[in-house]
Amino acid sequence: MQRMASTRRQALKTLAGIGAGLGAGLAGFGPARAGEVVNMGVLKLASHAPSYIAVDRGYFVAEGLDVAMKFFEAAQPMAVAIAAGDVDYGATALSGALINLADKGAIKVIGGALKEEKGITGSLILASGKAFEAGLTSPAKLPGHSFGITTAGSSFHYMAYKIAEANHFALSQMTLKPLQKLGAIVAAMTSGQIDAWAVQANVAKKLTTTGGAREIGLVSEVAPDYQVTAMFASAKNAGQARDKTERFLRAYSRAVDDYNAAFVDKTSGPDEVKALAAIVHKYLDPDTPADVAFADLTDGAMRISKGLAMSTTSLTDQLNWFKSEKMVKDTITPELLFDTSYVKTL
């Protein structure tokens, strides 16, 4: 708490100095407010670009929020951190662990985020270079092969199920390999220790470019309108801190509009695209050459729901799948999991 207080004081001091130097230049950000400290969970994926944009462009500051990003390697630990109060908000995939935390009254889904959409590249289904050369050239040939996931009940697990369902074979015909972290799955794909994976394009294209993997399909072909990630809050923030939560969502949605216009709809001018790409590159993967990072971001961007609209249809389908797999209780209802009072539902 002492560190947070110190960080807050430093941030406010810095903002005050900026305000004095720029004067009316900050008028576009609205009246100055004391920054209310917020911890936001983030994964190092391009789908979290609005997090970086909102922080860098001062959208949270404009809403009176002093936001600190906390980075995670997978959805499950982020969900635990939100439930514990270490993180206030975060965008991540629905998982068995998260649903079970909601059942305990600790966490709520308050919005939608990343989504699959036909006509947009989205997540790629990959075969390792070794497996591809041995004949794994389409998702229909996945039976008998291994498939990488972070943990049981993760979005990667659900995508494996949707791939199997669409290609008319049982999920049990693949060997799921839980490797805990994204980096571990990347390494396993590159070395041929696992045969297949499905992941967002900005990660997938690094593997296909280096020859570590080959594209064999698209998740959008097997799971159109799949709400890949959602916005979560602790139950306390969702239920007792409405003003703060609304301000957080408003700032984040502003960054979502920037992101979609630049990278998905491609309606922004070139200078705006370059400026946003530079922000994302700074936070996401500064060790990658800027031109490579720019190509990864612009070629593989997935839509994030405007206004963080929530696809309750897709999320309920995921909930029902978790129930069918006996990973969550049959008694858990959408009403228990979702707080639909903040955003539009689809």
Image (spheres, rainbow, N blue to C red):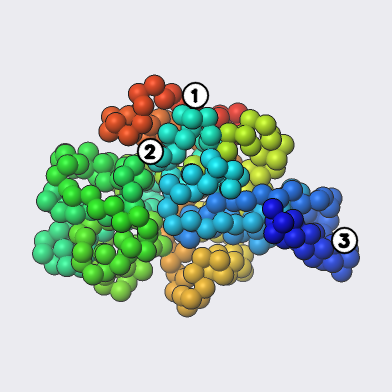
Label drawn at residue 24:
3
Residue sitting at 33 percent across and 63 percent down? 184
**Residue 196 in view:** yes
Report the residue marked by disc 1: 335
Mark 2–mark 3 distance (CA, rounded to whole Å):
49 Å
Q: Secondary structure at mark 2?
A: helix
Which residue corresponds to mark 2? 96
Q: CA distance from mark 1 to mark 3?
A: 46 Å
Q: Position of residue 242 (x, y in %)?
A: 68, 34
* First in residue order: circle 2 vs circle 1: 2
Q: Quadrant of residue 197?
A: bottom left
Say whether marks 1 and 3 touch (CB < 8 Å): no
Sequence-wise, the earlier of marks 2 and 3 is 3
**In the depicted structure, whether residue 296 falls above or below residue 267:** below
For the point 26% across and 69% down, the residue is 190
Distance between the alpha carbons at the discs numbered 2 and 1: 16 Å
Q: Position of residue 171 (x, y in %)?
A: 20, 41
Indicate the secondary structure of the residue bearing disc 1: helix
Q: Residues within 10 Å of mark 3 (few under 14, many from 20)?
A: few
